[in-house]
Every structure is written in structure tokens, then in C-alpha cells.
Image: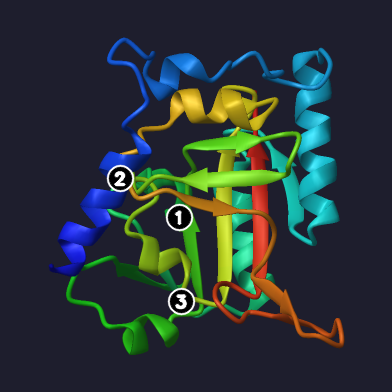
Amino acid sequence: MSSRERILGRVRRALADVPDDDPAYELAVPRDYLREHGQRTVAGMVELLAENLADYRAVVHRCTDEQLPELLTRLLAAHGSRSVVVPPGLPPGWLGAVDVTLVHDRAAHTPHELDRVDSVVTGCAVAVAETGTIVLDGSPDQGRRRITLVPDHHICVVRVPDQVVSAVPEALERLDPARPLTWISGPSATSDIELDRVEGVHGPRTLEVVLVGG
């Protein structure tokens, strides 16, 4: 008897006493948990997002649409960036004034090539206020996952309040599970058994989030 036959035999025995009309799992399990903890105004939700982003050691900035190009220019200059990865669908006006080399994302880029790029600028799919999390889904203004994991400096632009939700269940309703989702809560960091925090291990060492509204 093969391993496959043994496993399937155990499954059949485990299901032998389950009636044919037993409800499916997704119907049998109640889904009555809270979608969010408390009710918030739009302004309160945005403030909570900013607070939790900062708590995760992300650097938070705020500006209007008109101020965004100038702010991105200042942030890249302050970081000393000489090159920046650009997703294919990033609005061209965002980086129109920057004096850096724009590296347009290509599938042929190797991790070593991306590691030599100083920064990456992207949009986002959704941001979760309760957890201080931004979610990328590979849309044209965000690009492939690797461009937000290899460069050491990531600037992510979030449109408020349109892209901000209160809690994770609301975020899941907006996202397509078939897309490559990247959930980011602060810069990349990990701690060893001694609780020594090390940043930049499996993603950007520096995360800057720009909340754009108005």
C-alpha cells in the first residue's frame, strides 16, 4: 500500500460518520466577529493609522496632491538617494522634479542590480488603521514584490481617506486573494533570542509613508 493510499484511507475513516447533508465548512463556522473595534470618524481613522505607523518606526509625512512632488524630492535628497526604482504605473508627475536616476522596473532586473538602487517609490492598495499596516498588491503603481523588498529605502504614498480602512476585515474585502499581497508594518526588522532588534534583514531598513489628502 502506498503512502497516498494510507492517507486517503485515514481521511475516509475520519469522514465515515459525517452525514451527506452536513453543511459546508464556510457555512458551518459562524462569521459574527467584529469588523472593527469601535466606531471612528474618517479623521480619527487617519490619525490612528499615522500613530500606529510611527509606533512601528515608520516615518510619517503629510501633504496635499500639489505638495507631493516637492516632498518626494526632499525625502530622496535627505536620504542621499542617487537612484530610485519606479513601478511602471507610478504617476509621472510624482518624480518629475527629482534629480536622481530613475530605474524603471523590469522583469530582467536581478536582486543584485536592485540592491545597488538606493530607494523605491510606490503607491499602495490599502492601509489598515488599527494595525498600522500598508498592503501592496502588485498593481501598476506598486510594481513587482521584489522592488519593495530589496532596496533599503521605501517611500510609500497612501491616499487619505480613500485608501484607509479601520480594520483588517475591511481590508480583506478590498483585496483580491489571487494577487501577490505584501503586508508591511514598519521597516523590516527581527529580534533574536536576546531580543536584539536588527533592521533591514528581509526588506527595507527605512520606511517612509506619505499620507496624501486634499
Q: Please report the residue visible at 37 percent of the width from the left and 19 percent of the height from the top.
A: 24
Image quadrant where residue 103 sits: bottom left
Q: Quadrant of the C terminus?
A: top right
First in residue order: circle 1 vs circle 3:
1
* Mark toward the viewer: 2 or 1: 2
Q: What residue type is labelled 2?
A: Val
| Image mark for residue 95 | 1
> In this view of the protein, which residue sits in the foreground, 77 or 152?
152
Q: Which amino acid does label 3 sit on?
A: Val
Q: Distance between the residues labelled 2 and 1?
A: 57 Å
Q: Position of residue 201 (x, y in %)?
A: 60, 82
> Within 10 angstroms of label 1, few (less than 14), some, or many (20 or more) residues?
many
Q: What residue type is labelled 1?
A: Leu
Q: Please report the residue visible at 51 percent of the width from the left and 79 percent of the height from the top.
A: 118
Secondary element under disc 1, as helix, strand or loop, is helix
Name the residue tied to disc 2: 11
Q: Where is residue 202 in the image (x, y as percent from the top left)?
A: 55, 76
Image quadrant where residue 206 sits: bottom right
Q: Is residue 197 left or right of residue 210?
A: right
* Mark toward the viewer: 2 or 3: 2
